[in-house]
């Protein structure tokens, strides 16, 4: 979906789509015996990173030698030798399936010698499922967490009390634990597995400038990308070893990248080396990830926009600032939200490798189009973004998009197509949202956005 298409579709939002009859409320509560089976993704994306090896080297160094809080790491660390992993607690069959697929990808795409073991033997990586309330009591802001030097929750509690869980103190990784809330939606668990296992194995930092990676707090990507696998392949290449300094690693990266990524010539360019300023980062954290009041969060988004513009920050940071504002204005200022989202979409459309970001913009604009009664616009936006979302394997986003499309089809009197689309939305929702109660609430929220009735323009 091109941004020009966005502007064409959104240009008439103030004017509802004219129909020849009242819009009929959909029947979106299928009986239990008619519920579609859960749908799950197969395979993985393999898109090539869109920058030079020189830029990839800088990305690797910035991800590997610094923590998310800005603390520098003195040496390079990884697991030396084959890596074992075990699961503890009560994972589901779907959780096990997703883990098995992820481990296979890590072996195939990143060259990591990793295998799952059973029993009580201590593994290099332990994935433990716990009640969500237990994790929240220890780390209120976290959904799932990764901790070095421990192999169980009890061990983590003891080490935490003694302040002995420090990535910066490591010389080599030997034992790491990942703690995940039990009884979560399958996609929530899968996303935790991808993000936390990637950090347990490799880079510990996140960079806002990365538009093709889970190592980014923007949460656009939910499964490990080609870029992420390349970072892990670098981490476990024989030319590197635990204990090396940043300078030692940097000296080996050119030849290493030329060998494992020959399509990305090292001399092709430096790429974006920007580290997000602390005040911009704080503004975004307040806007999207804090418990501040709605007014304070909106002010923070406006601050982020001003910082990005006044200091001429990278397009990624400018776009995300507008995107954050568009999200926050959605329920308060329809026109303002649309303007902010279109501003974000304009920037993302010009950035190579930002198709997924553009698809997220399209989904949010589809909400605005539905609320304005522009059913045809909703369908155009969703159909344009859907292939990108499917490739990115985001069932939550895909289910929401299909719910929007089904409601738009209802508005156009396409009852049979709407029913089929809604069933498909529920099938993906069972993986993305988990419970039918959550799915039904989401369907109801979307259904109530549309105008109750629209009259013909000839009457």
Image (cartoon, helix red, strand yellow):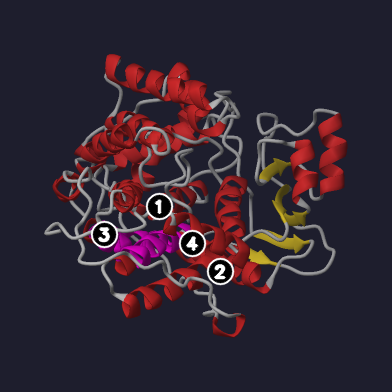
What SS does tag 2 mark?
Answer: helix
Gap between marks 1 and 2 measured at Cα: 22 Å
Locate the C terminus by quadrant: bottom left
Tell me where residue 332 sits by quadrant: top left
Do the residues bearing badges 4 and 1 touch, measured as CB atoms within 8 Å? Answer: no
In this view, which residue lies farthest toward the left? 458
Which numbered disc, 3 or 2, marks the residue that appears first in the sequence? 3
Name the residue that disc number 1 marks: 449
Gap between marks 3 and 2 measured at Cα: 25 Å
Name the residue that disc number 4 marks: 443
Gap between marks 3 and 1 measured at Cα: 12 Å
The nearer-to-camera label among 2 and 4 is: 4
- In the foreground, 38 or 255: 38
Q: Position of residue 390 (x, y in %)?
A: 37, 64
Badge 4: residue crowd in 10 Å (few <14, some 14–19, many ≥20): many
- Classified by dominant secondary structure, the portion drawn in magenta counts as helix
Name the residue that disc number 2 marks: 430
Do the residues bearing badges 2 and 4 touch, measured as CB atoms within 8 Å? Answer: no
In this view, which residue lies farthest toward the front? 459
Q: Give, as a single range, the part of the protein colored magenta.
A: 380-408
Name the residue that disc number 3 marks: 375
Badge 3: residue crowd in 10 Å (few <14, some 14–19, many ≥20): many
Do the residues bearing badges 3 and 1 touch, measured as CB atoms within 8 Å? Answer: no
Which numbered disc, 2 or 4, marks the residue that appears first in the sequence? 2
Which numbered disc, 1 or 2, marks the residue that appears first in the sequence? 2
Left or right, 220 with respect to 292, comes to: left
């Amino acid at each position: 979906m091109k941004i020009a298409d966005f502007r064409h579709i959104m240009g008439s939002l103030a004017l509802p789509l004219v129909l020849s009859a009242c819009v009929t409320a959909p029947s979106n509560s299928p009986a239990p015996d008619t519920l579609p089976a859960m749908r799950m993704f197969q395979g993985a994306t393999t898109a090539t990173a869109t920058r030079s090896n020189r830029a990839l080297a800088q990305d690797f160094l910035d991800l590997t030698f610094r923590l998310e809080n800005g603390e520098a790491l003195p040496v390079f660390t990884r697991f030396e030798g084959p890596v074992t992993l075990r699961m503890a607690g009560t994972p589901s069959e779907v959780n096990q399936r997703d883990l098995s697929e992820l481990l296979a990808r890590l072996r195939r795409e990143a060259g990591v010698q990793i295998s799952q073991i059973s029993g009580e033997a201590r593994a290099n990586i332990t994935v433990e499922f716990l009640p969500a309330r237990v994790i929240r009591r220890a780390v209120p802001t976290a959904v799932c967490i990764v901790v070095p030097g421990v192999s169980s929750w009890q061990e983590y509690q003891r080490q935490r009390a003694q302040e002995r869980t420090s990535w910066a103190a490591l010389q080599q990784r030997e034992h790491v634990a990942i703690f995940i809330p039990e009884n979560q939606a399958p996609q929530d668990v899968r996303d935790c597995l991808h993000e936390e296992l990637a950090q347990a194995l490799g880079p510990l930092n996140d960079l806002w400038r990365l538009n093709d990676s889970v190592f980014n707090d923007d949460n656009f990507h939910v499964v490990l990308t080609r870029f992420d696998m390349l970072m892990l392949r670098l981490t476990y290449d024989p030319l590197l070893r635990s204990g090396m300094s940043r300078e030692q690693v940097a000296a080996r990266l050119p030849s290493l990248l030329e060998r494992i990524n020959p399509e990305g010539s090292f001399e092709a360019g430096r790429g974006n080396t920007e580290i997000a300023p602390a005040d911009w980062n704080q503004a975004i954290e307040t806007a999207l990830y804090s418990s501040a009041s709605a007014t304070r969060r909106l002010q923070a988004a406006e601050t982020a926009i001003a910082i990005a513009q006044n200091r001429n920050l990278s397009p990624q940071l400018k776009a995300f600032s507008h995107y954050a504002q568009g999200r926050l204005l959605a329920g308060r200022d329809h026109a303002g939200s649309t303007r902010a989202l279109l501003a974000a979409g304009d920037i993302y459309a010009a950035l190579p490798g930002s198709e997924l970001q553009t698809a997220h913009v399209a989904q949010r604009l589809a909400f605005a189009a539905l609320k304005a009664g522009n059913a045809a616009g909703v369908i155009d936006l969703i159909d344009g973004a859907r292939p990108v979302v499917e490739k990115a394997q985001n069932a939550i986003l895909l289910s929401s998009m299909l719910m929007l499309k089904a409601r738009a089809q209802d508005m156009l009197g396409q009852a049979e197509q709407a029913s089929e689309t809604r069933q498909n939305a529920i099938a993906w929702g069972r993986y993305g949202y988990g419970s039918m109660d959550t799915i039904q609430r989401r369907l109801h929220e979307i259904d109530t956005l549309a105008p109750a009735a629209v009259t013909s323009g000839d009457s």
